[in-house]
Image (tube, helix red, strand yellow):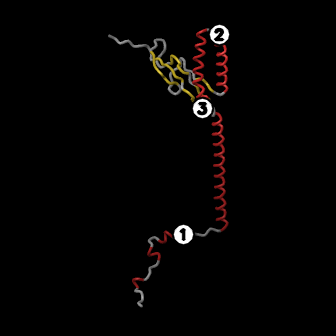
Amino acid sequence: MTEPSPETTQQPLSEEIPNAEAAAPVEEALPLDPITALTQEVYRWKDLAYRSQAELDNFRKRSAREAQETRAYANAELLRALFPILDNFDMGLEAARAESEKSMIFMGMSMVGRQLQDFLRESGVQEIEAQGKAFDPNIHEAVSQEASAEIAEGTILRVTRRGYKLKDRMLRAASVIVSSGPATTPEA
């Protein structure tokens, strides 16, 4: 048996891995006395507890706000489904009015119409005012334009379908016909 040659002997670990000192944790810093170390640990846990408590409070507030908003706008889809029915009811009411305002049908439909309007108002629904107002694309939907010598350009001439909002949210934009100003005649 031969003895290992000096070239084949194992080298120390620090020579095999470059920056071995950087890989090893530095534990040789000044040791803290136990009271200081425990005090720092207590402060760290206290800070974590305060942050967790603040996050929990924020979560509770956000959940309460979302629940309140959900309750406030829960009927929005039901109300949106009701609007086409109201439109048809209004057309029927106008047809009954055209026949005679003293007919029992018109009087009965008028009473039902008032009840429906009261129900909507109690539910927080407001009709969007449009007739004679300046056109606002946020709350009005222009279906056409008409020339008008009396009404200024950009003012609403007629409402073709009423718009509604629930508290501060838009449920349905008002469909309107907007004035394009006086008609221009081509000069010959």
Residue position marked by numbered label 2 in the rendering: 103
Labels 2, 3: front one? 2
Location of the C terminus (image quadrant): top left
Residue position marked by numbered label 3 in the rendering: 77
Q: How far is disc 1 from disc 2 in space, using C-alphas?
A: 98 Å
Residue closest to the far left: 188
Of 49 and 60, nearer the camera is: 60
Residue position marked by numbered label 1 in the rendering: 26
Q: How far is disc 2 from disc 3 in space, using C-alphas?
A: 35 Å
As shown in the figure, which amino acid type bears the numbered disc 1? Val
Q: If you read the primary sequence from the N terminus, does the residue marked by circle 1 or circle 3 appear first?
A: 1
The crowding category of the residue bearing disc 2, from other C-alpha atoms within 10 Å (few below 14, some 14 to 19, many at least 20), is few
Compared across the picture, whether 180 is left or right of 91 comes to left
Q: In the rendering, at what x and y percent does residue 160 appear? A: 52, 19
Numbered label attached to residue 98:
none
Report the residue at 45% width, 17% height from top: 180
Compared across the picture, whether 80 is left or right of 149 comes to right
- Per the image, label 3 sits on a secondary structure element best described as helix
Q: Is residue 141 above or below residue 16?
A: above
Of 105 and 31, nearer the camera is: 105
Report the residue at 59% width, 18% height from top: 90
As shown in the figure, which amino acid type bears the numbered disc 3? Glu
